[in-house]
Amino acid sequence: MFPPDKLLKAAHQIRPFIPELLDAAIAQRVSQQLESLLSTAVSEQDVDQQILTLLAEYETTREWLRLYVEENYPADAILKVIRTYSPLPETRHSVESPRYLCPVASCHQTWYRRDREQVIPNCPIHDVQLVRDSKGH
Ligand SMILES: [Zn+2]
């Protein structure tokens, strides 16, 4: 089980990221519940368990918590990690879409896959399918 002091720290750290991790309506509810838990946190014995229950309810917040508490990721790096393997509700801003390139070395066609459903297109010049940029960015 997570140590209570670390869980409380995680609960403070996750707050700005909740709107990125959950659908808007759920994010609002979770944020409010978290705020009220944190505002009463000091004296309550089981507040850490309540926080854990709240954040474990959703896959993305549970994973955030796990990465923060168990794997010691810095708070501002976790969103990016989660985005690489878990579809998040909205792609509003600062989403890192995988980049695709034409395999022809001299060609500079690029394309960003913004949705897993999107079909990877062919290069309009060479008519070969674009390949994922292995370098990442
Ligand atoms: Zn090309």
Image (cartoon, helix red, strand yellow):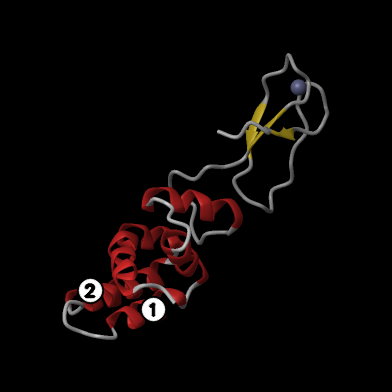
- In depth, the one of 30 and 8 nearer the eye is 8
Q: Residue at x 21, y 77 (%)?
A: 41
105 relative to 108 in the view: left or right: right
Q: Residue 76 at x, y = what percent?
A: 38, 49
User: Is 24 placed above or below 103 here?
Assistant: below
User: Would you name the residue on which mark 2 appears?
Assistant: 38
Q: Is mark 1 within 8 Å of ligand 1?
A: no
Image quadrant assignment for residue 112 = top right
Q: Quadrant of the N terminus?
A: bottom left
Residue 92 seen in render: no
- Residue at 43% across, 48% down: 77
Expressed as whole percent of the image width and height from the top left, the position of residue 17 reads: 36, 58
For image coordinates 41% across by 73% down, the residue present is 2
Is the CB atom of the residue marked by disc 2 within 8 angstroms of ligand 1's nearest atom? no
| Image: 102 above or below 59 | above
Image disc number at residue 54: 1
Amino acid of disc 1: Leu
**Residue 111 left/right relative to 47:** right
Q: Nearer the viewer, residue 93 or 35?
A: 35
